Amino acid sequence: MKRRTFIQNSALGGLGIVAGAQELNAQFKAQNQTHLVQQSGKPLVVATWNVPGSVQTAFDLLTEGATALDAIEQGCRVEEANAEGQSVGIGGLPDRDGHVTLDACIMNSAGDYGAVVYLKNIMHPISVARKVMEETPHVLMAGQGAEQFALAQGFERTNLLTDASKKAWEEWKRTAQYKPIINIENHDTIGMLAIDQNGDIAGGCTTSGLAYKMAGRVGDSPIIGSGLFIDNEIGGATATGLGEEVLKTVGSFLIVELMRQGKSPQEACEEAIGRIVSKNKNYANFQVGYIAINKQGEVGAYSIHDGFSITRSTQGKIEHKSSAFFNQ
């Protein structure tokens, strides 16, 4: 499954930059009442992108009575172990210096949170993030310290740079043009949300970040409130796409707060995208996508441009669907 088709600048010929925020908001409101995602019920799993194996694993655990937190961790691990994915875990595309660095976070129904950033040589950052949450007084660990912690917790060193990703990096070096361009990847991040049989919500987010990024760059994925946020009384949200834009609007927290105010998950995702495009005239050149669930098991998904998709459990079946999007 090709992954790196999501964040690059496609030739959107004919797409004009809308001049004013009023016109942008008018476009947004005109589309805002469409494409509502139907209620999925409980237990429930929904994830960014076409990841049926991850969602099936998580859903099977939930039907057996596992907690949402356990389901999230195990579901994310499936994709982290997929060396062909080139965007999560082993096989992720490296930074411009040829190093694969991973970010991940996890959040439980009690509001506890753990994250790792710029982690090297460890295949399952989602599990290291959980260890940070459960075994330390901290919420985020970075770089060499995070790696040392993982090794102390029993994780093994793994060479994350596969032959395919190394070849892609060497091809990139011929021109060395770093451009965050939309829809160059089918996914860059796995964000997953789940509701277990007790009605408790958890979420996780794992990524190798932008391909060929500057060394040290960290996006939204491991940052609480941006890449992921859970409030067990309300719901949860997670993001994918150009992390810099999600960070600027604290997108996942925004969506949960909008649901707290009474909006459906779909309406909240749409408003969060509307915030981005109304404030950034260059939205034609990048992509952001959100998914969200509420306590009732309703699901929402929305992105700036076409190309974003979700995988979810629906009445015991695993379903892959394209998301609605702003730029019609």
Image (tube, grey):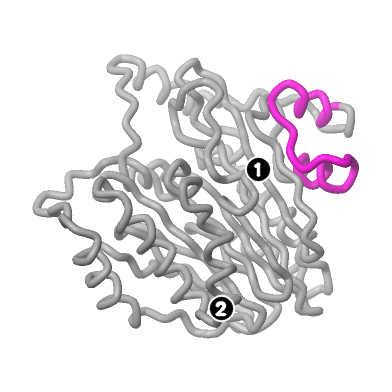
Q: Which residues are magenta?
A: 128-151
* Residue 168 coordinates in the image, percent (x, y): 40, 25
Q: Is residue 247 visible in this depiction of the protein?
A: yes
Instruction: Tell which of 73 and 79 is nearer to you.
Output: 73
Q: Is residue 217 left or right of residue 309?
A: right
Residue type marked 2 = Gln
Q: Which residue is found at the position 34% from the left and 42% from the top?
A: 184
* Residue 72 sits above or below residue 172 on the image: below
Quadrant location, the C terminus: bottom left
Pointer 1: what residue? 104
Residue type marked 1 = Ala
* Residue 227 sits above or below residue 118 on the image: below
Is 117 part of what is drawn in magenta? no
* Residue 55 sits above or below residue 224 on the image: below
Pointer 2: what residue? 261
Q: Is residue 294 left or right of residue 167?
A: right
* Residue 199 coordinates in the image, percent (x, y): 76, 78
Q: Which mark is residue 13?
A: none
Q: Which residue is found at the position 60% from the left and 76% from the top?
A: 260
- Label 2 neighbour load within 10 Å: few <14, some 14-19, many 20+: few
Q: Secondary structure at mark 1?
A: strand
Instruction: Tell which of 279 and 282 is nearer to you.
Output: 279
* Residue 300 coordinates in the image, percent (x, y): 49, 73
Q: Is residue 85 left or right of residue 152?
A: left
Q: Which residue is found at the position 57% from the left and 80% from the top?
A: 298
Who comes first in sequence, dot 2 or dot 1? 1
- Label 1 neighbour load within 10 Å: few <14, some 14-19, many 20+: many
